[in-house]
Each structure stands twice: as structure tokens, then as C-alpha cells.
Amino acid sequence: MDNLSLPSRLAVLATLAVFALLAFMTLESRGNWGFVLPFRGIKALALITFATSVALSTMVFQTLTANRILTPSIMGFDALYILIQTSLVFTIGGVGYASIDPVMKFTVESVFMTAAALALFGMVLRGVHDIGRMVLTGLILGVLFRSITSLINRLIDPSEFSVIQQANFASFNAVNVELTWITFVLTAACFVWLMSIHKRLDIMALGRDAAKGLGVDYERETKKLLAVIALLVSSSTALIGPVYFYGLLIAALSHKLIGTWRHQYLLPASCIIGAGLLIASQTLFERVLSLQTSVAVVIEAIGGITFLLLLFTRKTR
């Protein structure tokens, strides 16, 4: 794709993603199309929404931090989600947890995690050069959350531990229709807004001093972007569950295939790559190989390897 222009690269990626979507919707389809298409369609929408949300939050976060190995998930955010689920089961029991209204649970989790993410990511506001402090704080909080979760797991009724295990792993198979549409609307609104300020993002990628010199109110814009990142991460995590390295994998592929820091192309490319890769992987596992293994496990493994490669090759900026 090196000889193609940026719009042509986007067109090629979009075509491949459409083929993956068509394969997901039609392969191994037996029975009434009136049932198959809506059933698979809502699942495909959930996959696209989740991948888009992860892609946008990761790309914008890396722009703010000027670092290509940092993602919101690495900062201990998913550990907080697991702690919330474990605490709910411990407090009200497995039956009470299952009886919670999904929309209310989604709303409370999204609001709580958004507030927590803003408190954590707010460290960036003290200067983009204070990355070490922010990373260290995120890692320490992640360890703290996991330690508290481990303690609760030891105190909880063994019969309810299976409920925690199911809630604490990303699931691309069982998706709630109402939550999918809510998350889709939020993600679409964030995408439209981010695309409307893509030139401002290009300037902010130059760094705080350069952005201020070019007339951008860096602190004000950073607050807005952190709020959007927090909303995207919290809603996608509440919809599907915690996924640690997928955003990093999407970002690495986007930079490799697009080869530019222009957010006009980088943002849509990351969304297309993320959605296409996730749908293609789900199609391969479900329709072709007929495997019951969660595709999230394989994606996480590949994402972890990508993280190590970026770390050891020092391609972080």
C-alpha cells in the first residue's frame, strides 16, 4: 500500500472490512434470513461499536501523551471494572447481580468509571511531560484494584465465583440490544466531534508548547479530549468487558498501514482496521474453524506481543 494515496488506502481498508462483514453475516447461515440477519446484525453492530470506541480512545490518548505504547486500558482502568463487578456480586449475591436492570447497571458503571478515568487521566493536565508520574500512578492503582479484587474473591461464596468469572472476561457473543444502541450513539457522536477537530488534534500532537504557540488553548482542549476518552473507554468496557491490548494493536496497525499523523485519515483508518480485524477474527473462529475459544484471548495475545515489539524497538513516539 506504499504507492497508494491516503484516501486510496482508506478505500482499500474499508473494502476489506466490508468483505469481512459480509462473510460474518452470510457464512454458515442456515434457516430463515429474517431471523439470521437481525440476530447477526446486532452482534456485528456491537463488534463495530466496541472496536471503534477502543480505536478512537487509544488514538486520541496517544496523541495527548505523545507515546505510542500507552493506552487507557494499560492505566489500570480495566482493573477498576473488574473490582466493580466483583464488589457487586459480593454485596448483593449472584442472584441479585443477575436481576439488576442492564441499562441501569450500564449507566451507573459508565458514570462511575468516567469519573474515575477523569481523575486518573487528569494527571496529564499538569503537563504532557509528566508522563512517568501518570503511568506510575495508573500502574499502582491497577495493582491496588487487583489486590482488593483478589481479597474479595477469597471471601466470596465459591458457588458465586463462576458469576464473577463470567462478568470479568470480555464476551463478544452475548450482547444486550439496548446497551449496544446506547453505546453506538455515544461512539458515533464522539467520532463526529473528533473528526470535526482533526486539524486541532494535528496541532496538539506537536506538543504543548508548539500547540500554544499556534494559538490552541491546550489545557481547555485537553480537558475536553480526556472527557471523551473516559466516556468511550467506560461505555465500551461496560458493554463488552475489559480488553487490555486491543487498542494498542489497532494503533500499531494504523500507523503502519496509513503512515501519517494526520488525524483526518488516522482516526477513520483506526476505526476501520479495528472493526474489520475484530469481525474477521470472530468470523474465522465461529464460522470457519468452529472453535469455542473466545477470540478476545487470541487478540490479547497478539496485542501483548505487539506491545513488547514496540517497547524493545523503541518505536514509541
Image (tube, rainbow, N blue to C red):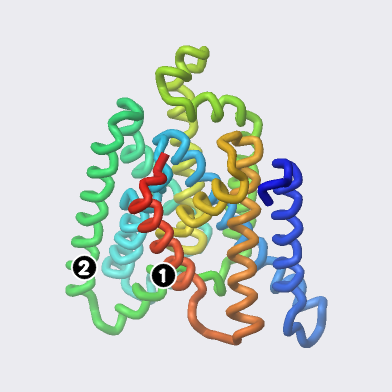
What is the quadrant of residue 197 in the picture? top right
| Residue sitting nearer the eye, 34 or 245 | 245
**Image-based side of 180 in relation to 27, left or right:** left
**Image-based side of 224 in relation to 125, left or right:** right
| Residue sitting nearer the eye, 86 or 215 | 215
Is there any visible trace of residue 105 in the rendered image?
Answer: no
What residue sits 47% from the left and 58% below the top?
238
Residue 144: x and y in percent read 20, 55
| Residue sitting nearer the eye, 151 or 56 | 56
Rendered-image quadrant of the C terminus: top left
Dot 2: element = helix
What residue sits 43% from the left and 34% below the top?
64
In the rendered view, tell whether residue 107 sits above or below residue 292: above
- Three-letter amino acid code at the position of disc 2: Ser
Mark 1 or 2 closer to N-term?
2
Mark 2 is surrounded, within 10 Å at the Cα level, by few (under 14), some (14 to 19) or many (20 or more) other residues, namely few
Task: Name the residue furthest right.
Answer: 33
In the rendered view, tell whether residue 26 sits above or below residue 138: below
- Three-letter amino acid code at the position of disc 1: Phe
Report the residue marked by disc 1: 169
Report the residue marked by disc 2: 150
Determine which of the numbered discs, if any, sits on residue 59 in the image: none
The number of numbered badges drawn on the structure is: 2
In the rendered view, tell whether residue 159 sits above or below residue 125: below
Residue 62: x and y in percent read 45, 40
Is there any visible trace of residue 176 in the rendered image?
Answer: yes
Contact, mark 1 vs mark 2 (Cβ under 8 Å): no
Residue 184: x and y in percent read 63, 52
What residue sits 64% from the left and 56% below the top?
181
Dot 1: element = loop
Residue 46: x and y in percent read 61, 62
